[in-house]
Amino acid sequence: MRNPFRYFNSSPEIIRLTVMMYIRYPLSLRQVEDMLFERGIDICHETVRFWWNRFGPMFAAEIRKRRVHNRSYSNWRWHLDEVFVRINGETHYLWRAVDHEGEVLEVFATKRRNRAAALAFLKRAMKRYGRPKMIVTDRPKSYRAAMNVIGNAADQECGRWLNNRAENSHQPFRRREGAMSKFRDVKTLQKFAAVHASTFNHFNLDRHLNSRSVFKQNRSAALAEWRQLAA
């Protein structure tokens, strides 16, 4: 494997730290620049933009590969939901699939919320993770129409509050979207949402379910693993 940092003057540690700060926390490019300057790292905000565009997808792909390899994903129940995103005054939709433990499985940006978009989203998720035993959705007709094509309409489940798992998974992305002052096009939305979902999964340590000592151990392990990405 070629060294992805070979043409960069900055060290891989600084690049990984910069990408993590921008993707993980609701910070703007200039806020990341100021925080790094306080640590003695003098870079431009455009360098932050370039680094996350260059290395963010690479880190996200490696995280997904490691998590799929080290953890057998349960296809017991998926939660599907979509959230609208404004791009240049037009409404677009970001579809999200979450498993029963809150792990973000797939995100998919489209211009429409119809059967074709739902079908493409379901095929994309099932191609990577297989077919789940149960799919929890809201009541848009596009889900039912797409599942009739796939042949798993009997596995759909709708009900009040049943899909809170997917609804809550939108919150970190919404906070991050506000710091970025919206998106410019669908490709940028898809790219950032995919990278953000993988980073969120990596650092989602279930703080509310573990004791302080267990949480600190998991946090140290997650940071150590992040520092080894693309090593």
Image (cartoon, rainbow, N blue to C red):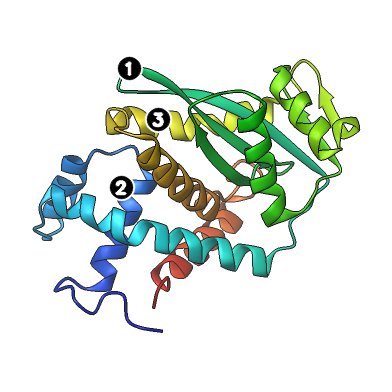
Q: Is 59 above or below relative to 138?
A: below
Residue receiving disc 2: 22
Q: Position of residue 50 (x, y in %)?
A: 22, 55
Q: CA distance from mark 3 to mark 2?
A: 12 Å
Q: CA distance from mark 2 to mark 1?
A: 25 Å
Q: Position of residue 220 (x, y in %)?
A: 48, 64
Q: CA distance from mark 1 to mark 3?
A: 19 Å
| Cβ atoms at labels 2 and 1 below 8 Å apart | no
Q: Is residue 206 left or right of residue 225?
A: right
- Residue placed most toward the observer, 108 or 19: 108
Q: Is residue 98 left or right of residue 36?
A: right
At label 3, the amino acid type is Arg
The disc, 2 or 1, on the residue closer to the chain's N-terminal end is 2
Residue receiving disc 1: 89
- Residue placed most toward the observer, 61 or 166: 61
The residue at 67%/56% (across/down) is 128
Q: Secondary structure at mark 3?
A: helix
The nearer-to-camera label among 2 and 1 is 1
Q: Position of residue 214 (x, y in %)?
A: 60, 57
Q: Is 104 above or below relative to 89?
A: below
Mark 1, Cα crowd under 10 Å, few <14 / some 14-19 / many 20+, is few
Residue receiving disc 3: 175
Q: Is residue 115 left or right of residue 171?
A: right
Q: Secondary structure at mark 1?
A: loop
At label 2, the amino acid type is Tyr
The residue at 73%/26% (across/down) is 143
Q: Is 166 above or below relative to 199?
A: above
Q: Dividing the image into 4 quarters, which one contains the N terminus? A: bottom left
